[in-house]
Image (tube, rainbow, N blue to C red):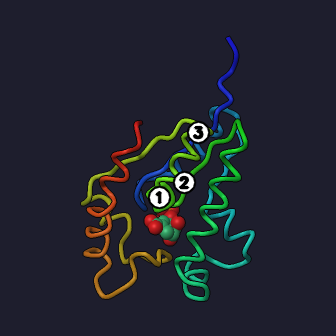
Amino acid sequence: MTEDRRNLVLTGFMGTGKSSVGQHVARALERPFVDMDTLIVEREGMSIPEIFRKRGEDAFRRLERELCRELSAREGLVIATGGGALVDDENRRHMEDGGCVICLDCGAEELVERLGQGEGRPMLRGDDPTERMRELLAARRPAYARIPH
Ligand code: S3P
């Protein structure tokens, strides 16, 4: 049997475990692991909150879009996306073309525990990170539901 060389892509809301699960899966499959946020931070020489603060969310989303295209043209990778990356239909289609996309899920109460005050996560900044998380989760549910696995 020939090995399936398609990328394995893990996506889902912040705190669902994409990076941790991705590292374990990559080790088990003996494949390279790519964490999209980590790669963006390395390339830009700035943390994610800094990118948002200095260049704005649109600039971050552009970097994400370019990276989705770049990675979907490669094969044999285990990829953890940022939580918002595949909310965009075009990004999702690119990743689906290049691999098997799996959406991780997690109960809202557990996410509240895991995300705490939203440290390091600019999408949760504001007076009430938990309320912001619930709003964002509700708004993104339909997009996550479009991912088949
Ligand atoms: C984001 C999630 C973050 C990171 C950025 C935006 C989002 O990744 O890409 O802060 O829009 O949900 P994690 O899901 O790894 O926290």
| Marker count (numbered) | 3
Contact? badges 2 and 1 (CB < 8 Å):
yes
- The mark nearer the N terminus, 3 or 1, is 1
Q: Mark 2: few, some, or many residues within 10 Å (few <14, many ≥20)?
A: some
Which residue is at a point 48% across and 50% down the rendered structure image?
Answer: 11
Q: Mark 3: few, some, or many residues within 10 Å (few <14, many ≥20)?
A: some
Residue, disc 3 = 97
In the figure, residue 49 lies in which quadrant? bottom right
Q: Is residue 102 above or below residue 4?
A: below
Residue, disc 1 = 88
55 sits left or right of 74 in the view: left
- The mark nearer the N terminus, 3 or 2, is 2
Residue, disc 2 = 91
> For the residue labelled by badge 3, is the local secondary structure a helix, a strand or a loop?
helix
Q: Amino acid at mark 1?
A: Asp
64 sits left or right of 124 in the view: right
Which residue is at a point 47% across and 58% down the rendered structure image?
Answer: 88
83 sits left or right of 3 in the view: left
Contact? badges 3 and 1 (CB < 8 Å):
no
Q: Amino acid at mark 2?
A: Asn
Q: Residue 56: horizontal and vertical position, in percent?
A: 55, 83
77 sits left or right of 125 in the view: right
> For the residue labelled by badge 1, is the local secondary structure a helix, a strand or a loop?
loop
